[in-house]
Amino acid sequence: MDMKLLAVVAALTVVIYSPPSEAKPISLVERCYCRATINNLPKSFIRELRFLHTPNCPFQVIAKLKSNKEVCLNPEMRWLKNYLRNAITKMKKYKQPN
């Protein structure tokens, strides 16, 4: 048998019978959810907010709108900063021992 053919058969056997990988490609793992943000969205359009903090991405705010669409918000918006500041203040107040 030809050595090249033997090498190809061996390589195909390894590929076919090796267990499938469960890992995601690096390009998908390192991507941030929010690639573009919206700078002006009224609070009245929002149903809920989610906050993501992943190691390789900046702080991300995802808003689910009343139309069930999800958009990324700029965390530097004035009303959003006030919302976060108030939420942190309330959390600190509840954690204080009486």
Image: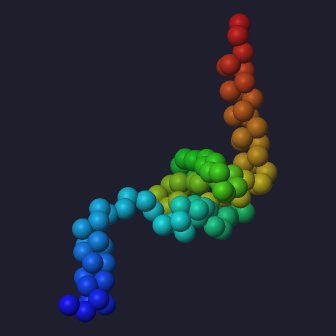
> Would you place residue 76 above or below residue 27 in this image?
above
Quadrant in which residue 73 is drawn: bottom right
In this picture the colour scheme is rainbow
Quadrant in which residue 7 is drawn: bottom left
Residue 89, given in percent of the width and then of the height, sits at 75, 29
List the single residue furthest toward the left: 1
Count of number-bearing discs: 0
In the image, 41 versus 74, the foreground residue is 74
Residue 19, given in percent of the width and then of the height, sits at 29, 62
- Residue at point 50%, 61% (across, down): 69
Quadrant in which residue 9 is drawn: bottom left
Along the horizontal axis of the image, is 13 left or right of 87?
A: left
Along the horizontal axis of the image, is 26 left or right of 2?
A: right
- Residue at point 29%, 89% (across, down): 3
> Would you place residue 12 above or below residue 3 in this image?
above
Along the horizontal axis of the image, is 15 left or right of 32?
A: left
- Residue at point 29%, 71% (across, down): 14
Residue 97 shows up from this direction:
yes
In the image, 34 versus 68, the foreground residue is 34
Residue 29, given in percent of the width and then of the height, sits at 53, 61
List the single residue furthest toward the top: 98
- Residue at point 25%, 92% (across, down): 2
Residue 42 shows up from this direction:
no
Residue 1, given in percent of the width and then of the height, sits at 20, 90
Quadrant occupied by the C terminus:
top right
